[in-house]
Image (spheres, helix red, strand yellow):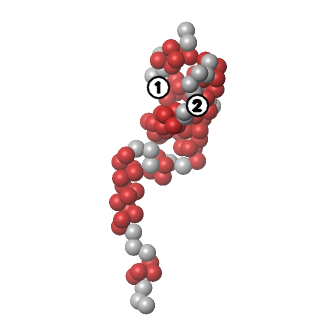
Amino acid sequence: MSFKDDLEDLETAEDFLRFLGVTYEQRVVNVNRLHILQRFQDYLSADTGMEGLDDEGMAARYSAHLERAYQDFVASNAIAEKTFKVHQEEARKMADRFVPLDALLPT
């Protein structure tokens, strides 16, 4: 079986993390599993250099992207990372509502 065939058998975030050799803490995955997988997909989609890689090269690249996605949520959280559209829209709304303190002070 090829690397891509093996990937098709994976179902959970933990499956991907174990298969790709990424060390993880279960508590981080429990809270951020969908965000980690979405960010992983974002990184894969942005990687234009995977064409022509053999299975070993592909596995290394996938592992690096998953490690990076996982670490994003170790160091931060889903709201700050704005992984999903709902978070991105909320950030835009908050930016539109922001009033600097200087604007409230009399001149």
Amino acid carrying label 1: it is Thr
> Residue 86 at what x, y percent from top left?
35, 48
> Residue 93 at what x, y percent from top left?
35, 60
Mark 2: give few (<14), some (14-19) or many (20+) Cα within 10 Å: few
Which residue position holds label 2?
Answer: 49
Amino acid carrying label 2: it is Gly
Q: Is residue 67 visible?
A: yes
Q: Residue at x 47, y 17 (%)?
A: 8
Which callout, 2 or 1, points at the residue further toward the start of the chain? 1
Question: Dot 1: what SS?
Answer: loop
Instruction: Give the residue furthest to the top.
Output: 1
Mark 1: give few (<14), some (14-19) or many (20+) Cα within 10 Å: few
Specify the quadrant of the image occupied by residue 52: top right
Query: Gap in Å between the C-alphas at discs 2 and 1?
Result: 26 Å
Which residue position holds label 1?
Answer: 12
Question: Dot 2: what SS?
Answer: loop
Image side of residue 89 versus residue 32, left or right: left
